[in-house]
């Protein structure tokens, strides 16, 4: 089922209001919607919401869809701010645009890439998905910082979580790029790893900014 962007945003607002703020409903004014708004009609037809006068109520039938809409939005925020280093209003705007693309399992792949985060950059909880429950039960944390690996482990670079251009240039000059294979040769006192036929060393601070997907994860 594919909802319109406006319908998803209404569900998000209602879920946050009811589940996190303890409100019973929201006004049309709060939702910036008119009584004949197409998105409201769409959600009413699906029995996800109920409109009583100027108040909009989230029905039980719409809670799961609303919860997942909030999950997609907050995962998008983590991607924009943690990985792409787009912060502030600009990051929030890009997250709002990107969240609507996180369907058909894309949200699960993103959640795994981000190592199943529990909160958004603003400290709000990210509703867990089936992938989070599975990861906790199996111990499979997917993508982790290089510093989580032991000497001898191999894997693939997932992404670089640094907003420092000098650090980024240093890592790129080493061949630390998403998709490149590596072998961790030593984990103390510095992290020595091999990429191709060359070996490089980084300290723990920089190692924590290199996210990898270990073999078997």
Image (cartoon, rainbow, N blue to C red):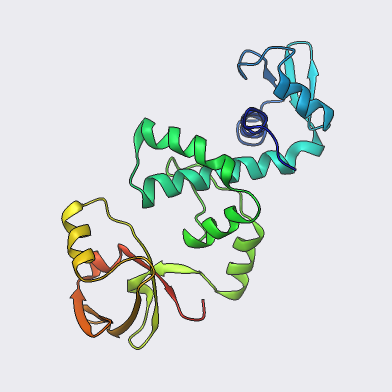
Residue 56 point in image, percent of width and height: 73, 21
- Residue 210 is drawn in which quadrant? bottom left
Query: Residue 26: in sight, yes or no?
Result: yes
Residue 154 point in image, percent of width and height: 39, 83
Residue 140 point in image, percent of width and height: 54, 73
Residue, x 35% and y 73% (percent of image)? 180
Query: Residue 189: in sight, yes or no?
Result: no
- Above/below status of 207 relative to 36: below
Residue, x 49% and y 45% (percent of image)? 76
- Residue 158 is drawn in which quadrant? bottom left
Residue, x 26% and y 81% (percent of image)? 193
- Residue 81 is drawn in which quadrant? top left
Residue 126 point in image, percent of width and height: 55, 48
Residue, x 19% and y 52% (percent of image)? 165
In-image side of 166 versus 217 (left or right): left
Q: How many marks?
A: 0
Q: Nearer the viewer, residue 29 or 79?
A: 79
Q: Nearer the viewer, residue 206 or 154?
A: 154
- Above/below status of 69 relative to 196: above
- Above/below status of 216 relative to 210: below
Q: Quadrant of the N terminus?
A: top right
In-image side of 139 versus 203 (left or right): right
């Amino acid at each position: 089922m594919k909802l319109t962007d406006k319908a998803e945003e209404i569900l998000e607002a209602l879920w946050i209001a009811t589940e996190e703020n303890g409100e019973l409903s929201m006004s049309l004014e709060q939702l910036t919607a008119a009584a004949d708004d197409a998105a409201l009609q769409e959600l009413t037809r699906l029995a996800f919401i109920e409109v009583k006068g100027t108040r909009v109520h989230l029905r039980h039938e719409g809670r799961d869809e609303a919860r997942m809409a909030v999950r997609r939005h907050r995962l998008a925020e983590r991607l924009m701010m943690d990985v792409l280093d787009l912060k502030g209003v600009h990051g929030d705007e890009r997250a709002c645009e990107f969240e609507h693309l996180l369907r058909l399992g894309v949200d699960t792949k993103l959640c795994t890439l981000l190592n199943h985060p529990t909160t958004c950059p603003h400290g709000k909880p990210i509703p867990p998905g089936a992938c989070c429950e599975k990861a906790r039960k199996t111990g499979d944390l997917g993508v982790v910082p290089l510093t989580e690996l032991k000497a001898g482990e191999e894997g693939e670079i997932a992404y670089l979580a640094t907003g420092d251009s000098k650090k980024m240039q240093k890592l790129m000059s080493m061949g630390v790029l998403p998709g490149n294979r590596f072998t961790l040769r030593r984990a103390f006192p510095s992290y020595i790893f091999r990429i191709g036929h060359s070996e490089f060393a980084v300290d723990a601070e920089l190692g924590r900014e290199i996210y990898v997907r270990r073999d078997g994860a």
